[in-house]
Structure formats: structure tokens, C-alpha cells
Amino acid sequence: MRLLVVDDEVSLAEAVARGLRREGYAVDVCHDGAAAIAQLDEVAYDLVCLDRTMPGMDGIEVCRHIRRAGSTGPRVLLLTARDTVEDRVDGLDAGADDYLVKPFAFAELGARVRNLLRRDRPQHAAVLAVGDVRADEARRTAFRGERALELTTKEFALLRYFLLHPGEVLSQERLLDHVWDHAADPFTNTVRVTVGTLRRKLSAAGEPPVIETVVGAGYRLVER
Amino acid sequence: MSLLYSGVVFGLGAILVALVYVGLSRALAGQPVTETQVRTMEGDPSCLQVGGVILCERSVETREVTVVDELKVVEKATNQRALERFRTVAFGGLGGLFVVSLVVGWVLAGRFLAPVGRITGVARSIGETDLSRRIRLEGPDDELKRLADTFDAMLARVEGAFEEQRSFIHEASHELRNPLAVMRTNVEVALADPDASPDELRDALAVAGRSAERMGVLVDDLLTYARRGAPEVGRERVDLGVVVAEAVEGFRAAASARDLRLVAEVTGTVAVAGDAGRLTQALSNLVANAVRLAPPGTMVTVACGRADESGRPAAEGPWAWTTVTDEGPGIDVEEQARVFERFHRVPTGAGDEAVRSGLGLTIVRRIALAHGGSVGLRSTPGAGSTFSIWLPALRGEDVGSPA
């Protein structure tokens, strides 16, 4: 899941990004509306945490830009210090999916992000499951059958992305785009390595493999 | 109300009737017909003339007495009858008058007092609804219309003040929320990470500390702003030259730390009526901005003087001015219009938005307005800015006697 955090308060944006990265999201940060739009045009983000009041182009304008660009744009969570009813109506009318008033509890931000990302899925449960592979996003735990998996943050993020797109062939580029952020070097074999370790951990007790390699196309999660 | 009115009318009617009655009865009693109108006929002393009637008798000695006595009796009876009749009519009239006045009073009082009722209604409904209601009384320009108009004007002022207060609180809370959010999120994210290194924790603490500092600045300025919100200022004689000297002295250390030359340019005495403390604060806010933003090695000039109506320097002009000129980056034209707005922070590129409240220039403007003056800004991007405060000058004869 690739997220963009936009806030002119640099230390707030960085802290939010740090917290979200620890929850296993790939997070980029920018500090004004124009930079946000440039980023959004370049990367297919799954969700944008957008500050409402920024100098120059504000959050509402960025939001309108996203919605003009198409219906399959990212989910938008507006972060704002303004909390009157009119402010909220404005934000939601501009196309925001949710609205969170500053100062917020980070736990709530995390819950709202998970909730927004779940909306596109067929099953709205907090626990993702395909076959005997399960991932609990809120607790950040994963299981193969009854066996708990010890996953790094990146492995968990990768597994979540596979669980969200069961049966689909996911290319290395797509995984890099949605699971890794700008800090990742696109020319390394980081995707291949991480998929490899995840695959090993999923079958560590001798279970049949669930991540297949589709030669020349990418990887696929199959139901067992 | 109408009872009082008809009571007064009745009383006045009664007094009038009583006066007429008393006057009449006096006049009737004091003017006997006999003395004025009974005369002995000229040329014939045996005849008496009463009005146009001529009475003749044989015995001249007795006839006059008898006739006069008889006439007196008749006259008295007539007077008595007339007065009685008058009394009856007067009492009847008074009773009628009382009833009519009661009705007329009721109707008139109702008509006259309807606007008062409306004013009362509006005043009462304001507590229940909002301050946007007005009486908007139609009709002739009389006392009640003027009362209603005064009331409307007062409501407009109160509503304006309320609106100002409300939006100020709204903006201020918004401004306080941002540093709070920075603090809270940083602390929560740092605490939630069991593997956070001491450096990461230290960073989070440093961010929280900076946010707290910023809130401190903001709260100080909010308090200043709230106090300066009242337009009341002292009215002693203030020499702007002294204000300039004080403001410059206060920033000398800060200026030399940034390698700036801070210069005061004062010629003669520039006197205004006002509050020395507040004027010093206003000028200090301007100097603080210049000293904070001017590029090292440049000059910041603080000056004061007098000017005529069109702003040209004039020794005996009606305006006193004090300016702060820097050789800094200048301010974009679009920004210039907004610099004095509340919570507006001009992007300075200094990366210090975090510790600015956005109230400094607003406070300057408030103080200038409270002194009957204004503020100005002339800026050329790339060449520098001149912020000015304009105040009504004390004329020569005013000097020494506070206005």
C-alpha cells in the first residue's frame, strides 16, 4: 500500500510518515500542494493524508485535482485544524473520503487509514484471509493456519498486498510501486529478495507454497 | 397607560370646568343688574329704565327700592338656575369626556406604543436567537424612530464585536492546534515504537520542545492581542523620537548578533498624544521583523518625522510618522495586501514559520488604529521594505497639554 502524506508542518508530516511506515505502508512525504500534485501524477497512490491548510495550493484544491483526474484515484483523508460543520462539508464535497481533526491520536489515524483502504475490497473485515493465510492489520500479525509468522514490516506489507489481490499476477514494478516508497532503489533486487524470504516463512513448517512465480510476469498468491 | 392618559385628560377637563364654574359664579355674584342697568329715566324721574324696559310709578320714593329688590330676587334665582344648569351640563360633559378619553387614549396609546412593543420583542428575542435581528422601524422621524435606529446601530456594533471575537477564537484555536498536533503525533509515534533508538526519542523530544516554544510565543501574542483589542489607549504626550530610541536600544544586541547596522534617524521633536508603552511595542514589532529577516551586513533604519496631508515631509504637518526600513528580500505584491491580516505569515524562506504567531503586524495595526492612525507598507521585492506607522501629530500649541 503506497501512501502520500502532505503537510506543510514538516515535523508533523515526518512523524505521521514514520508511524505509517511502521504499520507496513510505503509512505512518501511532501510539504505543499504543488509538490503533492506532481507526486500524484507520477505514482498511483492508494491513499493520501492531506493537510487542509497549506500556503499556496491548499488541501481542498489538491483534493479537487485528484477527483478531476479520475474516479479510480487514491482515497483521501483530510487532516485539518478546522472543525466547523462548514469546513467538514467543504472537505467532503471536494471529494475527501474522510476527515480527521488535529490534534488526533495516531491510533485513530491508523484505524482510519486501514478502514479507507479496506473499502475497495469485497470483504470488509479487519482480518485479511486467503485460504489458510491470514493477516490482522490492526495487530500487525500474520498466520499460516494456526502458526504465527514472524514477519518484518516490509514482509508484512508485501503479504498484505498479496492478500488484497489474490490470484492476480503482480509484477515487480507494481509491487515496488505499492509496497516500497521513494527511498527504495528501483534497480536493486529488493522485491525478489523480500518475496523470497516471505515465501520461505510462509512454508517454513513444510506447508505447500502459496506464492507462485509467473515467469516473465511476476508473482501470484494462490489459495491453499 | 391609557388609563393614566384618560385620567390626565379627565383631570384637565375637570380643572377647566371648575375654573369656568368659579369664574362664572364670581362674575354673576359680583355684577348685580341693579347697579349697572337700573337707571332713573332722564327728564322723567318717575320712571325707571331696566335694560330696554321702562317702569313708571306714582310714588317715586318707594318704587325704586321695590323694583330693585324684586329684580334682585329674580336675578338671584336666574343666576342660581344658570349655575345649576351649568353644573349638570359640566358633570355630564366631564363624564362623557372621561369615557371618550379612555377610548381615545386606549387607541392612541396602542398606536404610539406599538413600536415600543416591537423594540421590546426584538430585545427579548436576541437572547434566544442571534444578534443579527434588527428592529428596522418604519415611519416618521420621531423619538421612537430615533430610539429604534439607535438600538439598531448599537446591535450592529455588538454583533460586529461578537463576530470579531468569534472568528478570533476560531482562528486562534486553529493556530494552537497545529503545534499540538505536531507534539502529540511525534510523541505517540516515538512511544509506540518499542525499538526506538535514543536518537529517535531525542528527536521526538526536540520536536515537542520546539512546538511548545512556538505555542508559548503564540499564547503571548494572543494575550497581547486580546489586551490590545480594547481601543482605549492612554493619552499622554509622547515624543516619537524617544519611542524610536527605545525600540532601537532593545534590538541592538540582536542586530549586532546578525551583523546588521541598526540606525535611528530622528530630527527634532515629533509629539503625538497616546500611550508610550503601546507605541514602543508597535515599533518594536516592526524592528523585530526587520532584524530577524534582513540579510547580514545590511542596514535597518528606524526613523520618525512629520508630514503634510499628502505624506510629504513637513515640519508642521498634521501627521507624525515612524518607519522601519530594511534592505531585506522585500515582499511580493500579492503578499503586501495581506501582511497585516491576523495569523497571516509572509513566507520568508527563513524556515522559521514554526515560531511566528502571525499576530505581530496585526498588533501594530491595532495600536495604530487605536491612536487614530494607520499603518503602511512600501516594498520592492529584492530591494527592501519600509513599514510605517502614521499618527495624528500634536500641533505646537498642544505640546505640553495632553489632548
Image: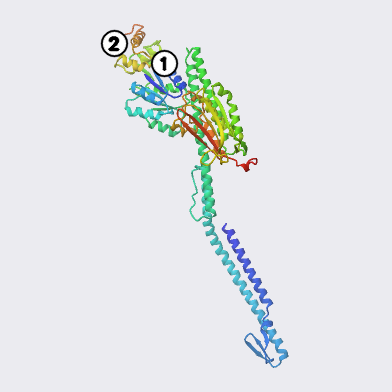
Looking at the image, which residue is at 48% across and 17% down? Answer: B190
Distance (Cα) linking label 1 and label 2: 26 Å
Q: Residues within 10 Å of mark 1 (few under 14, many from 20)?
A: some
Amino acid carrying label 1: it is Arg
Check disc 1 and report its element: helix, strand or loop.
loop
Q: Chain of mark 2?
A: A
Task: Decide: is B387 above or below B211.
Answer: below
Residue A84 in the image: state x and y as whole percent: 46, 33
Q: Which residue is mark 1?
A: A140
Q: Residues within 10 Å of mark 2 (few under 14, many from 20)?
A: some
Residue B12 in the image: state x and y as whole percent: 61, 64
Q: Chain of mark 1?
A: A
Decide which of tag 1 and tag 2 comes sooner along the chain.
1
Residue A80 in the image: state x and y as whole percent: 45, 28
Relative horizontal placement of residue B332, taking residue A191 as reference (left or right): right
Task: Decide: is B393 above or below A144.
Answer: below
Mark number for residue A213? 2
Task: Decide: is B188 above or below B375.
Answer: above
Mark number for residue B76? none
**Residue A34 position by quadrant:** top left
Relative horizontal placement of residue B33, taking residue A64 as reference (left or right): right
For the residue pair B123 and B279, the one nearer the viewer reads as: B279
Q: Mark 2 and mark 1 in contact (Cβ < 8 Å)?
A: no
Task: Decide: is B86 above or below B347.
Answer: below
Relative horizontal placement of residue B386, taking residue B9 as reference (left or right): left
Amino acid carrying label 2: it is Thr
Check disc 2 and report its element: helix, strand or loop.
strand
Q: How is the image coloured?
A: rainbow
